[in-house]
Image (cartoon, helix red, strand yellow):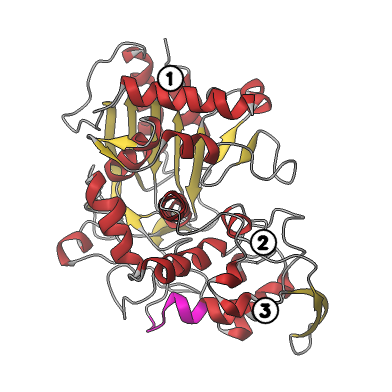
Amino acid sequence: MKKILSYCLLYLGLGASVFAQTISSAGNLPVSGISKERIAKVDEMLERAIQSEQVPGLVAMIVKDGKVVYHSAKGFADVAEGKKMEKNSIFRIASQTKAITSTAILLLYEEGKIRLDDPISKYIPEFANPQVLASFRYADSSYTSKPSAQVITIRHLLTHTSGLGYGVIDGDERMKMIYHKAGVVDLFTTDEVTIGESVKRLAKLPLHHEPGTKYTYSEGLDVLGYLVEIVSGKPFDVFLKERIFDPLGMHDTRFYLNEAQGTRLVDVHTYQGGNWITYPTTFYDPDYPKTGAKSFFSGGAGLSSTTEDYAKFLQMYLNGGIYDGFRLLSPVTIAMAMQNQVGDLWNWDRYYGLAFGVVNDRGVALGGMGSKGTFDWGGYFNTQYFADPNHKIIGLIFKQTSGAGNGDQTGWKFRQMVFSSVE
């Protein structure tokens, strides 16, 4: 209880002190509390990474006290076409979608429409009577299962402790085969399918383990995207636009892009034969945000965005739930969401809250991660972010690569050097 109260005081204090704080897009500004000379070192490091072809291109942004102290685009958005990266380039943010979906769930929670420990079967009956995988036959992907002693709750889905898997990127080959055979959609698709259809297929499949007993990265946030549709009565993309994106001014954050936005989408690249080339269509279609049926709204991986848009979302959290005078969440809700929600199931240098990984004492001691309470995550195509509520610093570094790459070290170096710039 004392810890929750201390977090509440932290976020209430932030909300009071930066009530109208917004992300300034005026350019790189001098701000007290952060070294201009050391930020220049960050720029030099990123420039070297581009010149040595660690990555084909990137956009990096640093925000301190709501002011942009660094925002730079380097390299190429499309190597083959020689198209330069721009500050407003649009990236597939993949799993960075999860924090936005979690925020949508918290909005419904604050309105009293759901409880976090409600069984998901209360809203999606197909999840009644969950089963746990017991045996598997590789020859034909057949399996047996046993009844679960626990039901899946909304909290389990938020915290990746439901027992659900993640299909094609799952760490268990058996689950990959089961999900593929069932036709579960994991990431991007240009096919005419909805999250409701995919989630109902998912609900019939066995779990990795009993809900609440382990942390297994999963499609739980896709399930919750469908839950938002059921509870709100609106398509998931419409709910996010009306309740999060429009109020925060996140006008380039969408599941699907219009024609003008499509021209700013960065190509996914992979490193082959000593060159960065456009990534081919594999289990996902890299053109997903621009083409196809445009009917699948993946709550776990479907959004595209810009560094500036996502910085606004993070600034709202640093502000204690408010942005540009608009209250999105209560600071009390944010304080709850930043608590350790999974105990020791996922707890090394960070623990897992309801929307983010959160740096703990061990993470502070290891160094390079920021102060205690810094929250973060990333995306499948090499996008990362972090936000420190103590120093009120946001860092984002967006790239768009897949595969082994070419020795990219910009992620950890960027974060470590940003925090080394604090005065």
Image location of residue 190, percent across then percent down: 37, 78
Whether residue 42 is situated above or below residue 38 in the rendered picture: below
Q: Nearer the viewer, residue 308 or 147?
A: 147
> What residue sits right under mark 3 in the picture?
205
Specify whether residue 258 is in view.
Answer: yes
| Residue 90 appears in the figure | no
The Cα atoms of the two marked residues, 3 and 2, are separated by 13 Å
Tell me the residue that label 2 is attached to.
162
**Residue 401 found in image quarter:** bottom left
Q: Nearer the viewer, residue 112 or 172?
A: 112
Amino acid at pointer 3 = Leu
Q: Residues within 10 Å of mark 2 (few under 14, many from 20)?
A: many
Label 3: how many Cα within 10 Å (few below 14, some 14–19, many 20+)? many
Where residue 18 sits in the image (x, y, percent)?
A: 30, 23
Determine the residue positioned at 37% across, 66% down: 232
Amino acid type of the residue that numbered disc 2 sits on in the rendered structure: Ser
Quadrant for the C terminus in the image? top left
Q: Residue at x 47, y 67 (%)?
A: 227
83 or 346: nearer the viewer: 346
Residue 168's disc number: none
Secondary element at image label 1: loop
The location of residue 68, given as percent across then percent down, is 26, 27
The part of the image, by quadrant, that contains residue 1 is top right
Residue positioned 32% across, 19% down in the render: 17
State the extent of the magenta-drawn residues as a range: 191-198
Residue 391: mark: 1
Check disc 1: other Cα within 10 Å, few if <14, some if 14-19, many if 20+: some
Q: Position of residue 399 (x, y in %)?
A: 39, 47
**Does dot 2 land on a helix, a strand or a loop?**
loop
Counting residues from the start of the chain, the first of labels 1 and 3 encountered is: 3
At mark 3, the secondary structure is loop
- What is the distance, in whole Å, between disc 1 and disc 3 at their CAs? 44 Å
